[in-house]
Amino acid sequence: MITAYPLTAENVREQVRAAEIDIEAFRKPIRACEISRCRATCCHDGVYLTEEEKNGVEDLVATHRPELESYGLTLPPEPIISARDGQAWKTATRPAQVEELASDYPQHFPKTRCVFLDPKGYCGIQRWSMEQQRGDWFDKPLTCWIHPLILLPRTLQRPRPLLTLVTPDNDPQKAENYPGFASCTHCGRPDQDGLPAHQVLTQELQTLSLLSGRDLLSEIIVIS
């Protein structure tokens, strides 16, 4: 198995199988994740979870709280909270210390941190999975490790889902007086000093390929 969340994975699998690939987006240069530079800016507000992921993370904390807290995590009694007027769940956050934030931390982001981040910005869930030899992302919510990839859903104008990277133009979180989310994170914005996105995101694309049974990386390279 690739993930601890098979129902969530099945939903992603069906979307990826049907998706059109935004080849141009994967040609754009981006920088690889560098925690020492970005300080896990993308994790500042926690992550929204499916019900399956919520239950899985809660079970992990209930069973392995001492191990997780030994990583330097400060876990509240309820590490998963309700959101969107009780219609969703997400990981809780805590106030960020100044030294935990990147030097270019977006001004419109709240100065908070996902409670599963250690003081250096590393994910405790991912560390636990790796130490248990379950794979880098086995217990990590899918939205976390897919970032900055996104699957835009079908619409009347778009008959197939679209696998792409967020840009300032298509950022689904962009709104009046809010420049966006993923396009404002370090790995979610173009960087002329970087490499083509399909090279930087090889591991993510290979994992999605295993999940979907579709060789995404080969498709991108052949067309590119």
Image: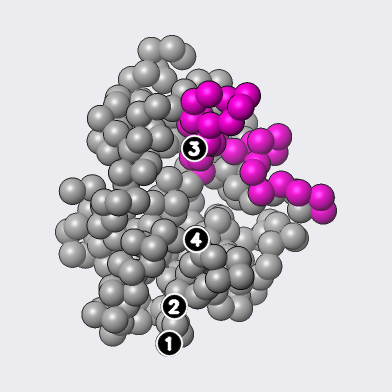
The dominant secondary structure in magenta is: loop
The picture places residue 198, in percent across and down from the top left corner, at 44, 29
Q: Which residue is mark 2?
A: 79
Q: Which residue is mark 4?
A: 48
The answer for how far apart the CA atoms under marks 1 and 3 are is 33 Å
**Residue 163 visible here:** yes
The answer for how far apart the CA atoms under marks 4 and 2 are is 12 Å
Residue type, mark 3 in image: Leu
**Dot placed on the residue nearer the N-terminal end, 1 or 4:** 4
Q: Which residue is mark 1?
A: 77
**Dot placed on the residue nearer the N-terminal end, 4 or 2:** 4
Residue type, mark 2 in image: Pro
Q: Residues within 10 Å of mark 3 (few under 14, many from 20)?
A: some
**Quick check: 101 above or below 14?**
below
Q: What number is the disc on residue 151? A: 3
Q: Which region of the structure is painted magenta?
A: 148-177
Residue placed farthest to the right in the image?
177
Q: Residue at x 54, y 65 (%)?
A: 87
The picture places residue 58, in percent across and down from the top left corner, at 34, 74
The picture places residue 153, in percent across and down from the top left corner, at 53, 36
**Quick check: 105 above or below 210?**
below
Residue type, mark 1 in image: Pro
**Quadrant of res 221:** top left
The picture places residue 89, in percent across and down from the top left corner, at 49, 67
Q: Secondary structure at mark 2?
A: loop
